[in-house]
Structure formats: C-alpha cells, structure tokens
Amino acid sequence: MKHNLKYLAVILGIFGLEQKLKGYIEKNGAEGESREKCGGFVLVRKHHNRGAFLNMGQNRQKTVMMLSVMLTAVLTVIFILTLGQAGKRTLKWGLTFLLGGAYSNTYDRLVRKYVVDYVSFNLPLGIKRVIFNIGDFCIMAGAMLSTIGSLPE
C-alpha cells in the first residue's frame, strides 16, 4: 500500500498546483487580456468556462456539473480498485493524471460555478481560440495512458 502513496501525492500535487495557478490568474488577469510567452507561441489569458470543452453545455451548467461529479466519482472508484491490483502501472498513472485534472476542474464547477482556463497556443486554424488549463492537459494525458494501460498485454 505504501508504494501507492506516490499516485495520491501526484493527484494532490496536480490539484494544488492547478488551484494555485487558477487563483493567481483570477487575481492578476483581466478577462480578454492576453500576455505572450515563449516568443508569442504561448498566450496566457483568463477565461471563465461555464460549460465543458469549448464551452459546450454552458446553458446547462447544472447538467455539466452533475456529469463532472459523476464521472469523477466513477473514475475514483476505478482508481481505488486498480490500486489494489498488482502491475497495471500505466493504467494507474493514467488514472492518476485523469483524477488530478478532474478533481481540479470539478472543484471549480462546484465552488466557482465555472472552470478557470488560462493558456492557449498561437496556432492557425482557430486553435488560438481554444483556452486550456493544466488540468485539461492532465486529463488528456491521463486518458491516453489509461487507454494504453487498459489494452491486453
């Protein structure tokens, strides 16, 4: 069981870092203001996402919130069950990253009533308009790792 503490520490680390960043953005960023980083490739800007990905469901905030809570709860149960199994390191790490991001974004939905997004990339084809947070990247990486870790060996 002691060797499973690393997964919990990473989940708490993602959640803590993300909440610290979101708090900083909330206090120091103005909606619509954009700051260029990394030679203009990375854009830091505050955005309140009241829906899910790309603001989908913004007119159904309660539904999005309940889905977020339910999916996070299901993933938590799967994670706990997986921790008790030998091996499955890739799946465990995938679920770890998924949950770190999910806990942060679900917390935002429950407490703030929106998710704080703050980073985008200066790329063509409308990609510049998509604004993320660290939790989103963790969810994407976690989903990929979980998928790979679930494949039969």
Image (cartoon, rainbow, N blue to C red):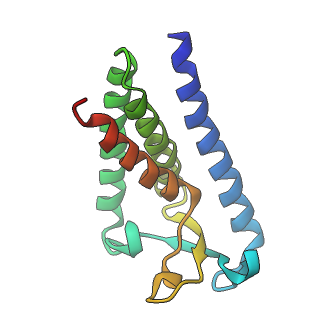
- For the C terminus, the quadrant is top left
- Image point 47% across, 82% down: which residue? 127
Outermost residue, left side:
152
Q: Say which of 142 and 59 sits in front.
A: 142
Q: Say which of 116 and 148 sits in front.
A: 148
Q: How far across and down, in percent of the image, does residue 7 sit?
A: 53, 28
Whether residue 27 sits left or right of residue 137 in the image: it is right
Q: How far across and down, in percent of the image, does residue 112 sit?
A: 55, 59
Location of residue 153 with respect to 124 vertically, above or below: above
Q: How far across and down, in percent of the image, does residue 26 sit?
A: 69, 66
Whether residue 130 sits left or right of residue 62 in the image: it is right
Q: Quadrant of residue 123?
A: bottom right
- Image point 59% across, 34% down: which residue? 10
- Image point 71% across, 83% down: which residue? 40
Location of residue 31 with respect to 73 vertically, above or below: below
Q: Say which of 87 and 96 sits in front.
A: 87
Outermost residue, bottom side:
125
Q: Quadrant of residue 121?
A: bottom right
- Image point 39% across, 68% down: which residue? 53
Location of residue 58 with respect to 134 vertically, above or below: below
What is the tally of numbered marks visible in this picture? 0
Q: How far across and down, in percent of the image, does residue 92 sit?
A: 42, 30
Outermost residue, top side:
1
